[in-house]
Amino acid sequence: GNSVTQMEGPVTLSEEAFLTINCTYTATGYPSLFWYVQYPGEGLQLLLKATKADDKGSNKGFEATYRKETTSFHLEKGSVQVSDSAVYFCALSDGQGGSEKLVFGKGTKLTVNP
Amino acid sequence: DAGITQSPRHKVTETGTPVTLRCHQTENHRYMYWYRQDPGHGLRLIHYSYGVKDTDKGEVSDGYSVSRSKTEDFLLTLESATSSQTSVYFCAAKRSQTNYGYTFGSGTRLTVV
């Protein structure tokens, strides 16, 4: 079945450092890809998405490019802030027709120190 | 997201007792989902619904049942709670198959003792 593998971390960075969180996927067909973020004590929020190959999703300084040839969707940010500390989940859409289910990676906890 | 409310937010229950978690949405989403979140596992789908009275199993459905008698409410029931069902449960919803965005509730932390 479809699956998502992401680096598990935890990842600890200093403020203004460059961030990369790797995500690769296995899927049949052409899934849509997502990054979700979970701040402490909260639910998940959509951070960015890409729906077809070579699409770049971006939001709040984060970006990720849908790479079909390498089946990857790595999350990057050029300069992280303390407020970016959270758990990040890579996900893909799974299913066709009526119900589209999200399949998640295990999550990567990011801590940014001042 | 204010459009999805989960209740209760926290619950402690004893092994063998039935438990029902409620997800209520005000956005007229057609599709609704129950996930559980556990360390080292990410989020795993328990059950989902693609309309009133239309539900199906996810990857970890054993020990759980769901009901959706109206669009706005999706109930998750643990018929006889076990310690392995201690987890954080999230409800999610989306409006249509062309809308790729899922909206998540704030979660219910369930502890089975």
Image (cartoon, rainbow, N blue to C red):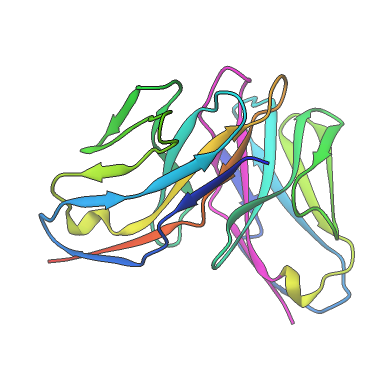
Q: Position of residue B51 (x, y in %)?
A: 78, 26
Asked whether residue A29 is drawn in magenta, I would say no
In the displayed structure, A38 sits above or below A110; it is above
The residue at the point 45 percent across, 61 percent down is A41
Specify whether B74 is left or right of A60.
Answer: right
In the displayed structure, B5 sits above or below A11; it is above
Quarter occupied by the C terminus of chain A: bottom left
In the displayed structure, A113 sits above or below A51; it is below
Q: Position of residue A98 (x, y in %)?
A: 72, 21
The residue at the point 65 percent across, 67 percent down is B87
Quarter occupied by the N terminus of chain A: top right
Q: Give residue A45's quadrant in the image.
A: top left
The residue at the point 80 percent across, 79 percent down is B14
Q: Position of residue A84 (x, y in %)?
A: 26, 53
Segment colored magenta: B86-113
Specify whether B52 is left or right of A93.
Answer: right
Q: Does residue A11 appear in the picture of this structure?
A: yes
Q: Give residue B70's quadrant in the image.
A: top right
Asked whether residue B109 is drawn in magenta, I would say yes
Looking at this view, is B63 or B30 the one in front? B63
Q: Residue furthest front?
A: A69
Looking at this view, is A38 or A92 the one in front? A92
Specify whether A19 is left or right of B47.
Answer: left
